[in-house]
Amino acid sequence: MVNSNQIVIFGAGKIGRSFIGQLFGCSGYEVVFIDVDPVIIAGLNEKGSYRVVIKSDKDMEILVPNVRAISALEREKVVEAVSSAGILAVSVGKNVLARIVPVIASALEKRHVNDPETPLDIILAENMRSAADFVREELMKNLPSEFPVETLVGLVETSIGKMVPIIPQAELEKDPLVVFAEAYNTLILDAKGFKSPIPQIKGLAPKSNIKAWVDRKAFIHNLGHATAAYYGYALHPDAVYLYEVLEDPKVLHFTREVMLQSADILRAAYPDDFTASDLEVHIDDLISRFRNKALKDTIFRVGCDLYRKLGPEDRLMAPINAAIKLHKPFDLILKVVEAAISFRATDEYGDHFPSDRLFFKESEKGVQYILDTICQIGK
């Protein structure tokens, strides 16, 4: 039997807990997390709740109630939970996403037997473009050819704009369930992706053209974040926090100019969805959020994982490749790419992001090599 007042969330990480879990949990839903971390699983089941600390001038705590967790290793329990969920969400990253689809497919088959007329909407809380197409293709590989995916599975893309910093180890030792986040709490999602009525939950912002909003996140938010980190590191390699480098007028001005250049590309791609003035207001709001000292977002977190962040579909190359097709200028964004190639920030222990070490070796082959092979410029 489907429990319409229950959400199952794959991924009890920072976005899963601080954003999706918080929105639904504080709106009366039972929240069931599926994860592999035994400490998180045991803690959630013992306490039945967790804290979200909103970092601003004055910290505020939100207690998310009515929570439990299931180990992803207990496949039968996971299938049972997903098959009877009122709604499903995934927040695990693209690589893990492909691995959980077979479990979701098994749950969909069980649901079809028990409740053949009840669709399952899946909120794709992933920072990836064309997430719905990716999940649809993976589901088709794992479901019988006659399974009615188009009528019984809602694939709801999102634009995740919430900033969640790395939590200091000392805080996690006090409470391994705590998660820090900024006050921003709007979940932009695809209104057309739902097969059931859209949940009436404060913070959900359905949009009719989700592709435009997903690209707005990549072209402006993610790009601006990366610009501040990479250009800020280039000028201030000893700085730790993003707000520190943005106190330098040169970094602040350059970051804003890069975001405006990318906004111009975005408007050319989606002339019916955005205006120049709307995007400029959005840019200034984002910069204000980037400068939130209480958030203590690190340059390392914002800039690390260079293979992904310099990929052809990500925050810098997606707008550049769009600009090439649209015949728009992208010289400022290209300067950010060059700064990213020289990015060497470390975490609180002095370590680099693991895969970045290999990137550093590849970068010795030169900027053009990185642009051609990793960034795939112009492709």
Image (cartoon, rainbow, N blue to C red):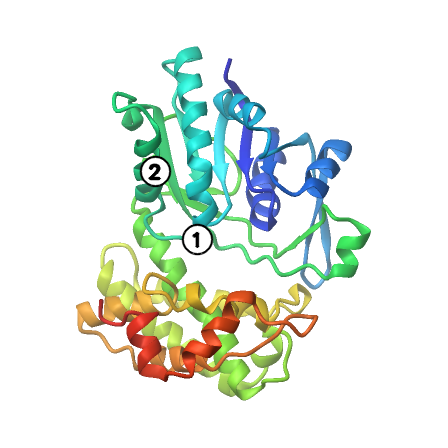
Q: Where is residue 20 in the image (x, y as percent from the top left)?
A: 55, 41
Crowd around label 2: few <14 · some 14–19 · many ≥20 (10 Å): some
Identify which residue, 131 or 105, lies in the foreground. Answer: 105
x 60%, y 50%: residue: 14
348 displayed left or right of 113: right
Picture quadrant where residue 51 is located: top right
Picture quadrant where residue 137 is located: top left
Which sits earlier in the primary sequence, circle 2 or circle 1?
1
Q: Position of residue 146 (x, y in %)?
A: 25, 20
Q: Is residue 27 visible?
A: no
Q: Mark 1 = which residue?
A: 127
Q: Where is residue 81 in the image (x, y as percent from the top left)?
A: 55, 24
Identify which residue, 5 or 305, lies in the foreground. Answer: 305
263 displayed left or right of 102: left
Identify which residue, 168 or 249, lies in the foreground. Answer: 168
SS label for mark 1: loop
Q: Do the residues labelled 2 and 1 touch (CB within 8 Å)?
A: no
Identity, as a three-letter code, of the amino acid under mark 1: Asn
Q: Can residue 211 be seen in this view?
A: yes
Q: How many labels does the image show?
A: 2
Front: mark 2 or 1: 2
Q: Mark 2 = which residue?
A: 138
Estimate the spatial distance between the alpha carbons at disc 2 and disc 1, rounded to whole Å: 18 Å
